[in-house]
Amino acid sequence: MSGPLLQLLRRKIEAEGPIRLDEWWQTCLYHPGHGYYATRVPLGADFITSPEISQVFGELIGLSLVQAWLDQGSPAPATLAEIGPGKGTLMADAWRALGVAPGAREALAPLALVEVSASMRSFQTNRLRGLPVRWYDTLEHAPAAGPLFLVANELLDALPIRQLVHLSGLWFERKVGISGSGHLGLMLDPRPSALGPALPACPDGSIHEISPAREIMARSIAERLVAAGGAALLIDYGDVYQGATGDTVQAVRGHKKIHDPFDLPGEVDLTSRVDFGPVVAAFRAAGCEVAGPVPQGEYLRALGIEPRTEALARNLDEAAAADLWSRSQRLVDPARMGRLFKVLGVAAPGRPLPPGFPAPDTSVPEGAAP
Ligand SMILES: C[S@@+](CC[C@H](N)C(=O)[O-])C[C@H]1O[C@@H](n2cnc3c(N)ncnc32)[C@H](O)[C@@H]1O
């Protein structure tokens, strides 16, 4: 076990002392030469995502965004964008669905794909051949061509996090250092963290995760919505946590959990459950409209996953139809992806939200003046 990233991290820690978890994470996933996303196409090999499970997922996302485009007055030009497009499957399915609204494809092209990984980009180039697509390193690099209609599925869970532990009324940050046995691993910074006063009240021994990178991502999407209009859908596994999040880091390789990923930088996928609370707060602080997060199963049902599956199944033989139904079921079943995954809807200030979310409760409370 002496990969280039392990040597690089070990040398840095030997020279500077333990490093923050988000710095270790950033290097593992995003190092330009040897990071996990720089060196492979992990979808299918290490994990599978909703668009890869069924075409219905991307179609319904496409329909939701095109409805948001119609509800915001069918602006032209506008931009359909995806951050972290993976194998390009969601965008291919969404593009097909856009065909239902005359003028939508013309108005929303070229499609803006924000992708950090060169290997993913080359996969997407093949998958989306023939579609009007442009790639960008960050959303800021994409030209502002009218209102933005954006989706990001399983992006936030990959962004780096920090972890803190609550002990005797104080918070201490977990860092990555070198243990007595010479292995990389987590250790506690002996100095209390200055972040303590901003963290939730919780029992001794609690672990809490924060992700400044997610909040930066939310602010950059919000900035574009505020400046130009539009809407966004962010889908990920997680919740709005009331207290501490706990330790939710998940390292995966070949569909199997890896219990100690610290000596395997760049070799395993890293994710953590998204705490949507700070993400929602970032959008609200920018003045955006927010709906959810709601469970993925409820959202897909509200958008009509069942009638869509039924319509597709009619043209299939019995075995293929059963397979299609079981894939839709996997996306909505609360015991599988239907409850763990959540969908957050966002719109520019004062603009309508995409469909699929419960209507805001506008009932007048009893006793309140009409
Ligand atoms: C878990 S995959 C999800 C792929 C796809 N959205 C799907 O649902 O199948 C994460 C994707 O986000 C990309 N990615 C990760 N961090 C990113 C970032 N900071 N900016 C843009 N893309 C990123 C990865 O290269 C990969 O394409």
Image (cartoon, grey):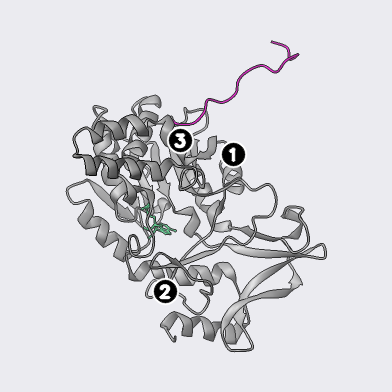
Q: Residue furthest left?
A: 130
Instruction: Compute the Cα span from label 1 to label 3.
Output: 21 Å
Identify residue for label 3: 299
Q: Earlier in the sequence, mark 2 or mark 3?
A: 2
Instruction: Compute the Cα span from label 2 to label 3.
Output: 34 Å
In this rendering, the label closer to the viewer, 1 or 3 = 3
Q: Amino acid at mark 2?
A: Glu
Q: Quarter-wise, where is residue 148 in the image?
A: top left
Left or right, residue 49 beside residue 315: right
Observer able to see residue 145: no
Q: Amino acid at mark 1?
A: Arg
Residue at image position (61%, 48%) is 278
Read off the magenta span: 356-370
Q: Are marks 1 and 3 in contact (CB under 8 Å)?
A: no
Which residue is more in the foreground, 168 or 193? 168
Q: Residue furthest bottom?
A: 181
Q: Which mark is residue 284?
A: 1
Is residue 321 covered in magenta?
Answer: no
Give the secondary structure at mark 3: helix
Q: Quadrant of the N terminus?
A: bottom left
Q: Quadrant of the C terminus?
A: top right
Which residue is more in the foreground, 260 or 310? 310
Disc 3 under 8 Å from ligand 1? The reply is: no
Q: Amino acid at mark 3?
A: Tyr
